[in-house]
Image: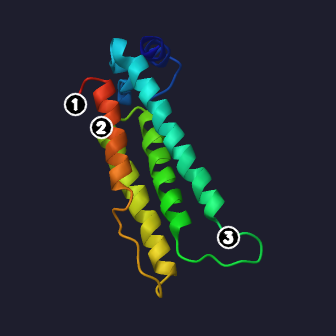
């Protein structure tokens, strides 16, 4: 597919920017060869964990005219969203190590916003989602035999 795309882009259509063309980088999933299916299975398992954390966060949210006590719902939301960001980065072609960086930045940003709005509460640790992100990275690298 990349070759067809490159041929299409290189055709002369009067575009003066053809000299600036850079070929598309190889997608990490496409570089795995016969291990790709194992990695996709691992990604599905990570998606199930993410969905579980999002569901648990919704279950713990206060209902109606009630007030939340504590922030356990946020802990589950944070873990679920960090895993979702990790998987989105993998889907965009990044390798697991680069996807970890994206997920950690997103999770840290969420925790900072949470802490800024709750000065009276005990603040969340900014690395609260790092354990699930690292587990997800390890699962993909083991599935890809790159650990």
Is there CB contact under 8 Å for labels 1 and 2?
yes
Q: Earlier in the sequence, mark 2 or mark 3?
A: 3
Q: Mark 1 points at which residue?
A: 147
CA distance for labels 1 and 3:
41 Å
Residue 66 on image: x %, y %: 71, 77
From the viewer's perspective, is the residue at label 1 or at label 3 nearer? Answer: 3
Residue at 45% across, 12% down: 7
Residue 34 on image: x %, y %: 35, 11
CA distance for labels 2 and 3:
34 Å
Q: Tell me: residue 46, above or below residue 69.
A: above
Q: Name the residue under label 3.
A: 62
Residue at 64% across, 58% down: 58
Q: Earlier in the sequence, mark 1 or mark 2?
A: 2
- Numbered badge on residue 65: none
| Quadrant of the frame with the C terminus | top left
Q: In which quarter of the image is residue 17?
A: top left
Q: Name the residue under label 2.
A: 138
Q: Nearer the viewer, residue 72 or 117?
A: 72
Judged from the image, the secondary structure of the residue bearing numbered disc 3 is loop
From the viewer's perspective, is the residue at label 2 or at label 3 nearer? Answer: 3
Q: Earlier in the sequence, mark 1 or mark 3?
A: 3
Residue at 47% across, 13% down: 1
Q: Determine if residue 91 is in view.
A: no
Q: Tell me: residue 103, above or below residue 126.
A: above
Q: In which quarter of the image is residue 64?
A: bottom right
Residue 11 on image: x %, y %: 48, 14
């Amino acid at each position: 597919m990349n070759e067809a795309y490159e041929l299409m882009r290189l055709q002369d259509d009067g575009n003066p920017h053809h000299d600036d063309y850079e070929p598309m980088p190889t997608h990490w999933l496409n570089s795995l060869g016969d291990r790709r299916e194992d990695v996709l299975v691992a990604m599905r398992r990570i998606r199930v964990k993410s969905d579980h954390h999002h569901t648990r966060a919704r279950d713990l949210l206060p209902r109606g005219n009630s007030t939340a006590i504590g922030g356990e719902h946020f802990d589950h939301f944070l873990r679920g969203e960090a895993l979702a960001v990790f998987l989105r980065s993998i889907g965009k072609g990044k390798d697991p190590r680069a996807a970890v960086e994206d997920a950690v930045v997103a999770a840290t940003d969420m925790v900072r916003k949470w802490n800024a709005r709750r000065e009276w509460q005990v603040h969340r640790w900014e690395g609260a989602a790092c354990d699930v992100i690292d587990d997800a990275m390890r699962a993909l690298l083991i599935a890809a035999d790159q650990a």
